[in-house]
Amino acid sequence: MLYQRYRYSHWDGTQQIFDIDASEVMDALSDDLLQNGDVMRALRELFRNGMENRDGSQMPSLRQLMEQLKNQRRQQLQQSNLDSVVDDLKERLENILKTEREGIQARLDDAASQPEPDDAAGKEQHRSLNQLLRQRAEHNWTVSMTFPTIWEGRSRG
């Protein structure tokens, strides 16, 4: 089992912080020492296999603890990698929106610089086209200004 389940409760002073006390560790070491006669081997076995206390709960081995650390590190690296991808996408989106806004402004400037026709029908058509262009430009500008807000809301959720 790589992950143990923990239950948290309000501290009332009766909880034991460590499930295994020193006498249990010494008992486990002395049993192994009596069987094999080697203190270093007894310690290695304790670190390699962990130990079980009187209640039957298992103290994780060093290998299990290392595996847990590797998994946590892998998860953190994946998370930071995803963060950099999102940051890159945000930057690209900002560049696209900037280009769009510049294009809208350029179209408005071009329309404003065109001379009006001399005849009345041409003037009316020119005004209505300019008005339509301004309405579309205003709509597109509004969309381009609200899009980053929408993007940020989705990336957080």
Image (cartoon, rainbow, N blue to C red):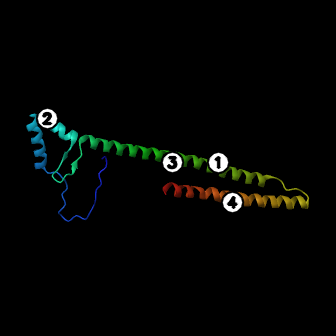
SS under mark 2: helix
- Circle 4 residue: 139
The label on residue 86 is: 3
Q: Is residue 20 left or right of residue 82?
A: left
Q: Which amino acid does the dot numbered 2 rest on?
A: Met
SS under mark 4: helix
Q: Position of residue 38 (x, y in %)?
A: 11, 34
SS under mark 1: helix
Mark 4 and mark 2: Cα distance apart in space: 77 Å
Task: Give the mark nearest the N terminus, 1 or 3.
Answer: 3
- Circle 1 residue: 99
Mark 1 and mark 2: Cα distance apart in space: 69 Å
Query: Tags 1 and 3 in contact by the CB under 8 Å rule?
Result: no
- Circle 2 residue: 40
Please name the residue shown 88% across and 58% down the image: 122
Mark 3 and mark 2: Cα distance apart in space: 50 Å
Task: Give the mark nearest the N terminus, 4 or 2.
Answer: 2
Please name the residue shown 86% across and 62% down the image: 124
Q: Does residue 80 sit above or below 17 in this rendering?
A: above
- In front: mark 1 or mark 3? 3
Task: Give the mark nearest the N terminus, 1 or 2.
Answer: 2
- In front: mark 4 or mark 2? 2
Q: Position of residue 117 (x, y in %)?
A: 88, 56
Q: Does residue 41 sit above or below 65 in this rendering?
A: above
Please name the residue shown 14% across and 35% down the image: 40
Label 3 packing within 10 angstroms: few (<14), some (14-19), many (20+): few
